[in-house]
């Protein structure tokens, strides 16, 4: 949602030696209402690769914090056992093909003899059954060969996608078996934020479907790709919400703490330009200018800030001002004018 700030109604107060004093009229406007929740940045693609065959680690080509491209070789296993299995499977396939050729020739011969009524029907049936069995043995041998080739491929572990290695679980020389963790990594190309919201606002979160994810010192990212889990946590009664980030700016990394600002509705707010607000010790205040041009110093309680594409910023005033009043846009000049008024 793009927030459009008003064009402040500027007025100039004359008769000030240091120059005219620009003021803005305090206005009430309808702005988005948000709910803020703590969030965790996660990688969409993150995985721990595990061994899929038995072997000993022969070579490790990448380590923690290394950047890998999709398809890069991460580790290699010893493959003598797999090579032997492949040779055995290839031999089995050749034997099955030879026996199939023999069965085909025998079937043609018996069929020809049977046509001349020189053998019984049972001989033809047996030859046909032998041929079908030979064909099935070829299929089984081809499956064994495919499995043996796959086992050999498992001795070379490749990166499933481009990313960064974050943990290495094995060392060169270790013997592994299927299921042994090898490396953990994630991709920075796609990130998401995971948080939870109370059941009182989950309907509004689903309805508006928009959240802003903010990390310290990094521009926030707007997400409209929100997934709300269809059940609440039994202990906290909160719903888990997952937001896919539309972009990944520099400074966003998996595991970081973030703030999630959910749009849950709209409400009227009293706004003043941010440059009109001053901080004096522990007091937050504005300089109010009345209809006669008299300046007053008034403490206020402020709330949320709003900014638009032009980089202008407005601040919500929760207490201390009313709509229609005017505030000075240059607090320094207003302060000088206030002192001048007191000395008269």
Image (cartoon, rainbow, N blue to C red):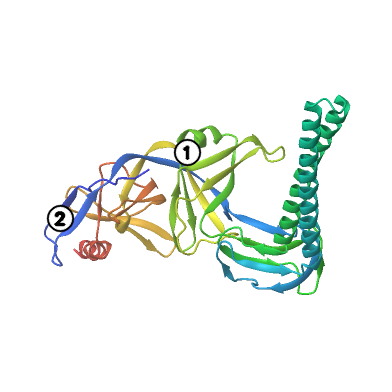
Report whether 75 appears left or right of 325.
Answer: right
Q: Position of residue 287 (x, y in %)?
A: 28, 56
Residue bearing the label numbered 2: 13
The mark lying in front, picked from 1 and 2, is 1
**Badge 1: how crowded within 10 Å, few (<14), some, or many (20+)?**
some
Asked where in the image residue 149 lies, by quadrant, the reply is: bottom right
Q: Which part of the image, by quadrant, shows the C terminus?
A: bottom left
**As rendered, which of 31 and 113 lies closer to the eye?**
113
Q: Residue at x 47, y 57 (%)?
A: 248
Q: Which mark is residue 167?
A: none
Vertical arrangement, residue 326 with respect to residue 64, above or below: above
Tag 1–tag 2 contact (CB < 8 Å): no
Can you tell which quarter of the image residue 240 is in?
top right
The crowd level at tag 2 (other Cα within 10 Å; few <14, some 14-19, many 20+) is some
Counting every numbered tag in the picture gives 2
Q: Up-down: is 27 above or below 177? A: above
44, 151: nearer the viewer: 151
Quadrant location, the N terminus: top left
The spot of residue 134 in percent (x, y) is 80, 41
Residue appearing at x 78%, y 31% in the figure: 111
Q: The residue tagged with tag 1: helix, strand or loop?
A: loop
Q: Which one is in front, 113 or 213?
A: 113
- Give how far across and how far down residue 71 sits, in percent: 58, 62
Q: Nearer the viewer, residue 111 or 240?
A: 111
Can residue 312 be seen by looking at this rendering?
yes
**Residue 319 seen by the camera:** no
Mark 1–mark 2 Cα distance, whole angstroms, equals 45 Å
Q: Earlier in the sequence, mark 1 or mark 2?
A: 2
Q: Which numbered dot is residue 209?
A: 1
Q: Residue at x 21, y 63 (%)?
A: 337
């Amino acid at each position: 949602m793009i927030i459009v700030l008003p064009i402040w109604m500027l007025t100039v107060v004359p008769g000030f030696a240091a120059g005219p004093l620009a003021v803005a009229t305090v206005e009430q406007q309808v702005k988005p209402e948000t709910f803020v929740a703590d969030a965790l940045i996660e990688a969409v693609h993150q995985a721990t690769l595990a061994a899929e065959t038995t072997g000993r680690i022969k070579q490790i080509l990448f380590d923690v914090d290394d950047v890998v491209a999709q398809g890069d070789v991460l580790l290699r296993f010893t493959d003598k056992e797999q090579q032997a299995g492949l040779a055995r499977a290839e031999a089995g396939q050749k034997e099955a093909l030879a026996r199939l050729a023999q069965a085909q020739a025998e079937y043609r011969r018996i069929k020809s003899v049977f046509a001349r009524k020189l053998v019984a029907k049972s001989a033809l049936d047996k030859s046909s059954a032998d041929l079908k069995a030979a064909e099935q043995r070829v299929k089984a041998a081809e499956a064994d060969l495919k499995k043996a080739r796959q086992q050999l491929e498992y001795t070379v572990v490749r990166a499933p996608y481009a990313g960064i290695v974050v943990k290495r679980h094995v060392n060169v020389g270790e013997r592994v078996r299927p299921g042994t963790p090898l490396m953990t990594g994630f991709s920075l190309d796609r990130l998401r934020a995971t948080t939870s919201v109370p059941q009182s606002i989950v309907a509004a979160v689903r309805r508006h479907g928009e959240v802003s994810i903010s990390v310290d010192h990094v521009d926030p990212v707007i997400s409209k790709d929100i997934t709300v889990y269809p059940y609440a946590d039994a202990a906290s009664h909160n719903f888990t919400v997952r937001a896919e980030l539309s972009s990944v700016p520099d400074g966003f990394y998996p595991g970081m703490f973030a703030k999630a600002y959910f749009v849950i509705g709209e409400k009227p707010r009293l706004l003043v330009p941010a440059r009109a607000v001053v901080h004096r010790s522990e007091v937050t205040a504005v300089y109010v200018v009345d209809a006669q041009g008299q300046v007053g110093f008034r403490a206020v309680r402020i709330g949320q800030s709003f900014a638009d594409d032009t980089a202008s910023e407005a601040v919500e005033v929760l207490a201390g001002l009313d709509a229609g009043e005017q505030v000075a846009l240059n607090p320094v000049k207003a302060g000088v004018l206030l002192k001048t008024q007191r000395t008269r």
